Image: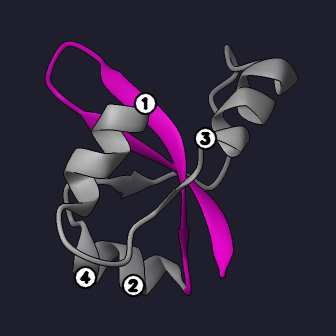
Amino acid sequence: MQSHLVAFEYGTGAVWGFVTAPSIDHIAATVPELDVVEAPPSWMTEDDLAELRNQAVDIEGDFALDRFLRHA
C-alpha cells in the first residue's frame, strides 16, 4: 500500500490528508470525492506533511470518506 496526498474540496476551501491505497486508480474508484495531488501546495510545510502522514487513513471498507474527514 502506498500513501497519497489528497484533498476534499468543499467550495470555499479544502480538507487535506493522506490516504493509503494500492493505487491512484483505486482511490478514484473507491472515493471519487477525493482529488489526488501529485505535489503539495507551496504553503504546506514539511511539518504539515509529516502531521498529515501520521494521520493517514486506509480507504478500504465502508464509509471511507467519512473516516477521512473525521481524521482530517
State how the image is colored.
Answer: one colour
Which numbered mark, 3 or 4, is in the foreground of this view? 3
- First in residue order: circle 3 vs circle 4: 4
Q: Quadrant of the N terminus?
A: bottom right
Q: Amino acid at mark 3?
A: Gln
Q: Which residue is mark 4?
A: 29
Q: Residues within 10 Å of mark 3 (few under 14, many from 20)?
A: some
Q: Residues within 10 Å of mark 4 (few under 14, many from 20)?
A: few
Q: Which residues are magenta?
A: 1-22
> Is residue 39 shown above or below 26?
above
Marks 1/4: CA distance? Answer: 21 Å
The residue lying at 59 percent from left, 50 percent from top is 56
Is the residue under label 4 in contact with that under label 1 (CB below 8 Å)?
A: no
Residue 45 is tagged as: none
Residue 72 is tagged as: 1
Q: Which residue is mark 3?
A: 55
Is the residue under label 2 in contact with that under label 4 (CB below 8 Å)?
A: yes
Q: Secondary structure at mark 3?
A: loop
